[in-house]
Image (tube, grey):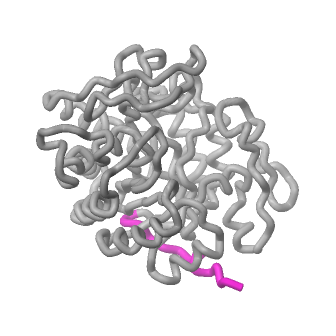
Amino acid sequence: MTDIAPLLTPTTLGGIPLANRVVMAPMTRNRADDRGVPTPAMTTYYRQRASAGLIVAEMTQISPSAQGYILTPGIHNEAQVAAWREVTEAVHAEGGRIVLQLGHTGRIAHPDITGVQPVAPSAIAAEGLTFTQNGQVPFVEPRALTLEEIPGIVAQFRLAANFAREAGFDGVELHAANGYLLDQFLRSGTNKRDDQYGGSATNRARLLLEVVSAAIEVWGPGRVGVRLSPFNPYNTMSDADPFTTFPTVAALLALQPLAYLHVTYGGGSPEDRARMAPLMRSAFTGALIVNAGYTAESGAEVIAAGEAEAVAYGVPFIANPDLVERFAQRADLSAADASTFYMGGEKGYTDYAVMAGAVAE
């Protein structure tokens, strides 16, 4: 039987101390109100899961035009800051640590939600449908950002980082994964620019690095993380050579005083993951969080082998607010109800039971 003790030992990611190495992955749950303000249910939800070594709160839009889905939270006005402060205070009261994932959805935004045409590195629409208050509608063609507009995007991230600090978070994670704006710049399938933000992997990483610098100006060293997804095809994403692109990006990020790099390997084959993981470990010399399909045993193994400092779990945390204790006790895990993942009320959100059989309060 695999020893899971490595997963339960304390560590520090940059300047963020963790009681254990079980990280709650960021997951969109669509429980904010229609103004993008976090609700009391969200405070309960995160407080219930405060035994995680670190909570990475869900993707949170940095501006009204950055929103890609209905009922997702923002961090661009004082009402949102005040509501998020209730979340951070509740998590801290339980001894937990929590960072906020800052994101801009780029071409995944829709005029039905934002009232404006979405922006992207290039004028290439995502395929398929998205859900708005008007039901399912096709994605629209985005407008390519001009060079003059890009500093404004960086400024939005900087302001959001300031607001997150004001709300009492322990740091921020920059969302450069899963087909959103920063990822759209990174991957060659969505970035066809011929200026300094396109072409080589280094150029395609330029916007991310500018946003990283802005966030570090706000937070200082060791409080800013970055999330990457080398293989995830979600939102019709692709890259001609991920095995060059993402180690290059990781090496550039290693030059910054980050808290951590968070790599999710979802969408890649076992062979892809086996090839990419050592490249990323070699390229990034700081603290590494890995994600996608890990069990307690496999998570402990990658930590023991020095392949990562922490492991992020998504769906298991939805149905098991006491996931760390269940891992420690080798207890069975509850199954999550996928029909309640997005939108709705308390059902499938704050009503999952802890091991003793009582609902987590």
Q: Residue at x 46, y 72 (%)?
A: 274
Is residue 218 something that shows in the picture? no
Q: Nearer the viewer, residue 49 or 83?
A: 49
Q: Depth check: 66 or 112 in front?
A: 112
| Pick the front one: 178 or 360 | 178
Residue 301 in which image quadrant: bottom right
Residue at screen point 40% across, 50% down? 173
Task: State yes or no: residue 6 in magenta.
Answer: yes
Q: Quadrant of residue 236?
A: top left
Most foreground residue, 79 or 334: 334
Where are the magenta residues, as a range?
A: 1-15
The quarter of the picture where residue 16 lies is bottom left
> In the image, 343: left or right of 54?
right
Residue found at x 73% / y 51%: 319
Give the side of residue 234 with respect to residue 227, left or right.
Answer: right
Q: Position of residue 228 (x, y in %)?
A: 39, 54
